[in-house]
């Protein structure tokens, strides 16, 4: 916009200058026009590719694959170059014609995160080994063949949304044109259409695998592509679900999330021995869920009308389940956010527990702070993931050396959370809920199946909130019968724990086997 205004002002000045001169002085503009005509035209943006050949041992079997790291030029609905989007594609070489082989499009969330976490932790043919439940030692890091990659069952394309990785807007388009629920859905959808067309994959069984805000995105993308692009999908894998943000963001005036967090608080308290260890964790969590959706939710609904006796009873029960002191729970008015819980649980020991994975604990930066300042799990593994990915990108995939790869950008603070849901003629004024889009997509496509993966120790997207979200995708029994839930004794990035990664691979492989015939 500033460029156009500046050009407009320059144009006015040139015109005024010409008008003030007599006719012989009209030669300079002619020279300017001629020079402009003779100036070399700017080259249109081009896609980049680095293609390399590799073999990895997956499930005990050598798997040969072609890796393509690069960028695609994605066009908008007017066929204008819109964005250059970075990606890495892994295509198995010995599994028959690519046109009929399954393919999965994958990304992380944020919004504002690149795909390095799923890439180097779960889905790519190489993974970085990190300590589980504690800090990973500094480099050199151990990078190994990913025995649990789904590459033996499906080709894998990892996508970096605009603003992350090497992905950036083109021409006069800016980051803000992509940083919102709906433009993000559209840009990723158009990337997928472009990749599918360029690589002859229209007839391949297709899957989406998204983590965290990536599940918000996936619910919208599958509906957008089926409704607008004529592209049907076989399955959607939701890793740590965040489709209905009203169910997980305890903003002022929104009491809905507090009961959904309680079972995860209870699991965390038991893990850190802040409450007596239950004889049967699953049975105990079922009891906590029943209380959360019953008496606790009813007490919160009462608001200021809640009687002193009932308030005291709820405080006692919350103490029994969470290990937080009754005094703290009274002062919190029965409402404790996940960042407050993570700061408070082990405060007396000078420790903060992780929000992404509450099995992790680290030194508290400010012992007097109300909420956490950082996340021990993120601190423990981020360096390893970043170093391992960039080393693999530069030395293994032969791409991007000398260029800045943005692991995480500041999109979240600028994000437009308005969303146009199916059936509503205007963007929804409430917190984003793309679960409605997923329900629409599952009605649109009677064979679409969904797999939701949950970490018991995830305080960012708690598993009980996921159960609520999936139950409200659609009330129809035929839709609900196509939704599967899986649980792992780990956190938001359940694949950090190798036993959970192994189970995750089995669950994804089973979905592909059931839906790709």
Image (cartoon, grey):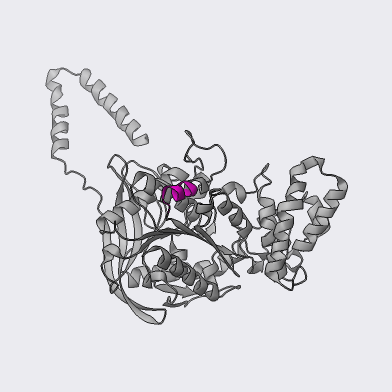
> In this rendering, is residue 456 above or below 148?
above
**Any part of residue 220 in sight:** no
Q: Residue at the spot x=53%, y=75% of the render?
A: 498
Judged left or right of residue 457, residue 22 is left
Q: How many numbered circles does the render carry?
A: 0
Quadrant placement of the C terminus: bottom left
Q: Residue at x 32, y 69 (%)?
A: 397
Position of the N terminus, as image quadrant, is: top left
> Which secondary structure type mostly characterizes the magenta part of the structure?
helix
Residue placed furthest toward the front: 477
Q: What is the residue that sits farthest to the right in this orientation? A: 309
Residue 414: percent from the left, percent from the top? Answer: 50, 44
Front in this rendered view, residue 150 or 291? 291
245 vs 146, left or right, is right
At horizontal 80% and vertical 51% (from top left) the residue drawn is: 331
Residue 155, compared with residue 193, is above or below; it is below
- Residue 21, percent across and down? 19, 19
Q: Position of residue 354 (x, y in %)?
A: 63, 64
Please say whether residue 370 is one of the residues in the magenta stretch: no
Q: Give the magenta part as a residue range.
A: 438-446
Determine if the magenta segment contains residue 445: yes
Residue 15, placed above or below residue 504: above
470 with respect to 125 (left or right): right
In the rendering, at what x and y percent does residue 447 appear? Answer: 42, 55
Residue 282 visible to the viewer:
yes
Closest to the observer, 186 or 281: 281
Image quarter for residue 290? Answer: bottom right
């Amino acid at each position: 916009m500033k460029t156009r205004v500046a050009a407009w002002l320059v144009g006015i000045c040139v015109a005024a200058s010409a008008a003030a001169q007599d006719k012989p002085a009209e030669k300079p503009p002619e020279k300017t026009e001629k020079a402009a005509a003779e100036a070399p035209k700017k080259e249109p943006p081009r896609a980049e590719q680095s293609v390399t050949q590799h073999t990895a041992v997956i499930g005990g079997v050598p798997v040969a694959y072609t890796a393509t790291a690069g960028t695609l030029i994605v066009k908008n609905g007017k066929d204008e170059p819109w964005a250059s989007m970075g990606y890495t594609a892994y295509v198995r070489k010995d599994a028959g014609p690519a046109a009929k082989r399954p393919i999965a499009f994958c990304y992380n969330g944020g919004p504002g995160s690149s795909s390095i976490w799923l890439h180097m932790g779960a889905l790519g043919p190489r993974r970085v080994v990190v300590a589980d439940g504690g800090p990973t030692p500094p480099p050199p890091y151990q990078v190994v063949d990913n025995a649990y990659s789904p590459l033996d069952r499906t080709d894998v394309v990892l996508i970096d949304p605009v603003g992350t990785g090497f992905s950036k807007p083109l021409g006069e388009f800016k980051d803000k044109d992509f940083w919102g629920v709906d433009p993000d859905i559209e840009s990723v959808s158009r990337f997928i259409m472009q990749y599918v067309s360029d690589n002859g994959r229209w007839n391949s069984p297709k899957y989406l695998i998204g983590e965290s805000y990536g599940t918000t995105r996936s619910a919208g993308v599958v509906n957008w592509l089926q409704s607008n692009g004529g592209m049907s999908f076989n399955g959607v894998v939701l890793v740590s679900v965040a489709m209905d943000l009203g169910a997980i963001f305890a903003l002022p005036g929104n009491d809905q999330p507090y009961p959904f967090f309680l079972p995860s608080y209870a699991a965390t308290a038991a893990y850190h021995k802040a409450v007596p260890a239950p004889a049967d964790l699953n049975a105990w969590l079922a009891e906590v869920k029943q209380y959360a959706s019953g008496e606790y939710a009813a007490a919160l609904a009462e608001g200021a009308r809640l009687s002193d006796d009932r308030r005291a009873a709820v405080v006692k029960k919350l103490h029994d389940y969470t290990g937080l002191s009754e005094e703290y729970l009274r002062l919190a008015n029965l409402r404790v956010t996940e960042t407050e819980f993570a700061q408070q649980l082990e405060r007396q020991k000078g420790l903060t527990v992780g929000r992404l994975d509450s099995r992790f604990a680290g030194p508290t930066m400010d012992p007097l702070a109300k909420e956490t300042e950082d996340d021990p799990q993120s601190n423990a593994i981020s360096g390893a993931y970043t170093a391992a990915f960039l080393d693999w990108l530069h030395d293994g995939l032969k791409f991007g050396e000398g260029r800045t790869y943005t692991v995480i950008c500041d999109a979240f603070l600028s994000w437009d959370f308005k969303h146009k849901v199916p059936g509503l003629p205007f963007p929804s004024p409430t917190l984003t809920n793309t679960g409605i889009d997923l329900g629409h997509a599952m009605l649109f496509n009677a064979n679409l199946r969904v797999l939701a993966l949950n970490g018991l120790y995830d305080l960012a997207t708690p598993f009980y909130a996921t159960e609520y979200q999936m139950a409200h995708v659609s009330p129809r029994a035929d839709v609900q019968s196509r939704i599967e839930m899986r649980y792992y004794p780990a956190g938001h990035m359940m694949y950090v724990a190798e036993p959970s990664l192994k189970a995750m691979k089995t669950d994804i492989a089973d979905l592909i086997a059931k839906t790709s015939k």
